[in-house]
Amino acid sequence: MAKAKDILTLIEADHRKVEELFEELEKSKSSKKTYDCLTQIYKELNLHAKAEELVFYPAMREYDETAEFIEEAEEEHEEAEVLLEEIKTMSPSDDQFKTKIEQLKKAVQHHVEEEESEIFEAVRECMEDDELKSLGKEFQDAKAKLEGEVVAAIK
């Protein structure tokens, strides 16, 4: 049996994947490649945010030390979601396209930085390894269940 991954490791892996997709998007020279990268970014960010909201944030609410971070994190998710929906309706040739992509990238970078420094540190102080691994499984299960819904929303 594969070693269970804790939720923080899984979240970090998602962060790295999205960072790579943004790099690919920036290097993209064709409309198809741009569209493919955007589709992947849309899918990854939505799955990640929804799974965090279903699994990670409820667990964080159990501890005073981590509950304080949730409101801002949820606001950041909402900001990214709004930008994703705006970008989804645009063509790469639209005047605002690159600006919206930059806004999204900055919003995601800010969220990732706060999450990996402040939030993860607080979570590690409160939660035991067993809880983090259990949450990791729940996080993966939530993403698997949500995938069809998120993919359908891309179109």
Image: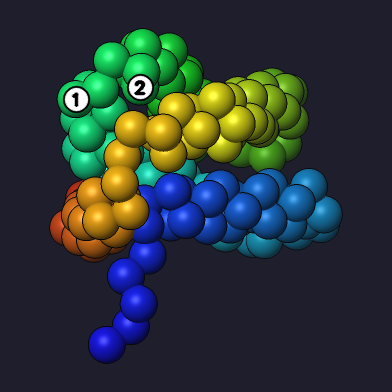
Q: In which quarter of the image is residue 147?
A: bottom left
Where is residue 66 drawn, in percent x and y?
35, 22
Does the CB distance between marks 2 and 1 fall below 8 Å? yes
Which residue is pictured at 38% across the width and 45% down the height?
A: 48
Label 2 packing within 10 angstroms: few (<14), some (14-19), many (20+): many
Q: What separation in Å lies between label 2 and label 1 (alpha carbons)?
A: 8 Å
Q: In this view, does 12 lie above or below 127?
A: below
Residue under numbered circle 1 = 62
Whether residue 31 can be seen here: no
Q: Is residue 126 left or right of residue 111?
A: left
Whether residue 61 can be seen here: yes
Q: In this view, does 107 lie to the left or right of 10?
A: right
Q: Is residue 70 left or right of residue 33?
A: left
Label 2 element class: helix
Label 1 element class: loop
Q: In which quarter of the image is residue 64?
A: top left
Residue under numbered circle 2 = 66
Where is residue 107 drawn, in percent x and y?
60, 24
Q: What's the coloring here?
A: rainbow
Q: Name the residue nearer the viewer: 40 or 129.
A: 129
Amino acid type shown at disc 2: Thr
Which residue is pictured at 37% across the width and 65% down the height?
A: 5
Which residue is pictured at 47% across the width and 56% down the height?
A: 9
Tell which residue pokes out farthest to the bottom in this image: 1
Q: Name the residue nearer the viewer: 29 or 105.
A: 105
Label 1 packing within 10 angstroms: few (<14), some (14-19), many (20+): few
Where is residue 41 drawn, in percent x and y?
53, 48
Point out which mark residue 120 bears.
none
Quadrant occupied by the N terminus? bottom left
Circle count: 2
Q: Name the residue nearer the viewer: 126 or 59.
A: 126
Q: In this view, does 5 lie to the left or right of 80?
A: left
